[in-house]
Image: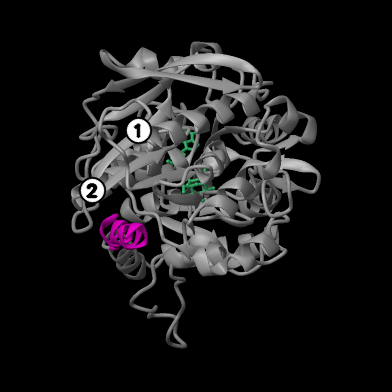
Amino acid sequence: MKVLFASSEVWPLIKTGGLGDVAYSLPHALQQQGMAVRIVLPAYQAVLKKLKSFEILGWLALSVAGKEYSVRILQTQHDKFSLPLWLVDCPALFDRAGNPYAHEEGYDWFDNSERFTLFSLAVARLGMDDLKINWKPDVVHTNDWQTGLVSAFLDQEADRPKRIFTIHNLAYGGYFPQQEFQRLQLPSQWWSSEGVEFYGNLSMIKAGIVYSDQVTTVSPSYAKEICTSEFGYGLAGVLQHRRYKLTGILNGIDPEAWNPQTDPLLPYHYSAKRRNPGKKKNKQALLESNKVEATKENLEAPLLGMVSRLVEQKGVDMIIEAIPQLLATSTANFFFIGTGHPHIEGQLLKLSQQHPQRIMVSIEYSEAKAHLLEAGCDLFMMPSRFEPCGLNQLYSLRYGTLPIVHRTGGLADTVIDAQFEDEKNKRINADATGFVFDIATASEFSTTVHRALAIFEQKKLWNQLQRTAMQQNFSWDKSALEYIQLYS
Ligand code: ADP
Ligand code: GLC
């Protein structure tokens, strides 16, 4: 079976979050199961800079917003990829510094609607083998709003491939005003409540939902949640009506990129069986990376970490609210790595200035530091208000850094709460892998941190939890098969 997999970001070439990780690891897992897969990505400036050579597969003449674009399709190989990567090369729209969606100074590109309409149109044409290279996919698998229009464009073709659309995050809908729909000169028959129209605006994610043959999201719990008004971002009704074609398939992780025994970004390696001294030495390296002296006291104190986009979804504000009380009532120290809303960045920096020995903050995007934090911390904080799947809790489990999570979406599906099983607090459930709380408030979070810290003091129980967490299997094997079943 031939699969064309389209995404607006693909690790290690360009990534702003978990979509990039999945767009790398899922296609590779599909390939391992015998699928012939091509990944297609816009040829951003940052991506072209990382690649050594390309072959020109062909040219597409595409018309968007009344402009005629002559777009090159490049095929390239990269050390990390065992399958061909295709790039949609349209310099006028993609040859810019900055991330896929925003200028270096943080604001969204003014022409994002045009950029991702063109990308989607290119993917649809590749799906119809317009290059005449004798490679017509059986399935076009698209991801999030940036590729939502692909399924709509393919709707106009009788002999089209099957269309699978994966929702990684419903909070980002690719919404643009009606004038923009007109300016883009999109087919007028799409403008209806059964098409791309959403409360008077154009919604690219809705296009993906409506026009695809199958819709998936990245965990079973999130598939249920998005059909409710609380999590549906106005699309709950649209999704409820299409429940027959909606499936939740849990994300896997790349077992090579995230393996504490071999991770090239870690100074010290360790395994589930032999965690120390490797884990502790990583803790020392992590503290020292932030110029905090790794005294015996510091190495023994629990270290709670977070790597995150600093946005409302992730519940960082709950942690910030809980911190003064946690500092006063425990010996815990905190380490944050992230970028995002300036006011959240500012609040974290202020806390670290007030408590330089206990709160460490790196406002940056650093893969090396993210891996070191996963290895060097004792606990990982992920009190997300909603979480379609979440990868960081999976990385944390693998690295023996027990996650503290809010029971929502993929967090609920992947972390098992530690509960005492006897009155003397000597035994916890054998399947426990972390700490889960039910209500997203600072006080629930704080209570759960205290619960975790009490177990941290009981080394036997802590060891049991770490071992169980590290032995969990979140490889893609099972989930890739579920996708293949859908494709079939
Ligand atoms: P989301 O996709 O919603 O951001 P996930 O948990 O699915 O959440 O994935 C986030 C990914 O982005 C992880 O691989 C995480 O390590 C990475 N990440 C987020 N922020 C940073 C950062 N500041 N530096 C390095 N990696 C980061
Ligand atoms: C989104 C979600 C995250 C998920 C990731 C990959 O960014 O916020 O929960 O893990 O996509 O599917």
Between 226 and 410, the residue placed more toward the observer is 226
Please state the horizontal and vertical placement of residue 123, each as a whole percent of the image.
Answer: 44, 33
Specify the amino acid type for callout 1: Asp
Q: Is residue 228 left or right of residue 394?
A: right
Callout 2: CB less than 8 Å from ligand 2: no
Can residue 190 be seen from the camera position used here? Answer: yes
Can residue 294 be seen from the camera position used here? Answer: no
What residue would you read off at disc 2?
A: 35
Please state the horizontal and vertical placement of residue 52, each as a whole percent of the image.
Answer: 26, 13
**Which residue is the extreme one toward the front?**
158
Please state the horizontal and vertical placement of residue 135, each as a whole percent of the image.
Answer: 27, 35
Between 355 and 148, the residue placed more toward the observer is 148
What residue would you read off at disc 1?
A: 129
Mark 1 vs mark 2: in front: 1
Please state the horizontal and vertical placement of residue 317, each as a whole percent of the image.
Answer: 68, 47
Q: Residues within 10 Å of mark 2 (few under 14, many from 20)?
A: some
SS label for mark 2: loop
Question: Does the segment drawn in magenta span residue 446?
Answer: no
Give the magenta-colored segment's residue range. 472-488
Q: Is residue 350 left or right of residue 383?
A: right
Callout 1: CB less than 8 Å from ligand 2: no
Label 1 close to label 2 by CB (< 8 Å): no
Between 322 and 227, the residue placed more toward the observer is 227
Prevailing SS of the magenta stretch: helix
State the image quarter where residue 387 is shown: bottom right
Q: Earlier in the sequence, mark 1 or mark 2?
A: 2
Residue at horizontal 32%, vertical 63%?
Answer: 485
Residue at horizontal 48%, vertical 56%?
Answer: 213
Specify the amino acid type for callout 2: Met
SS label for mark 1: loop
Rendered view: 12 above or below 484: above
How was the colour assigned to the protein in this rendering? one colour
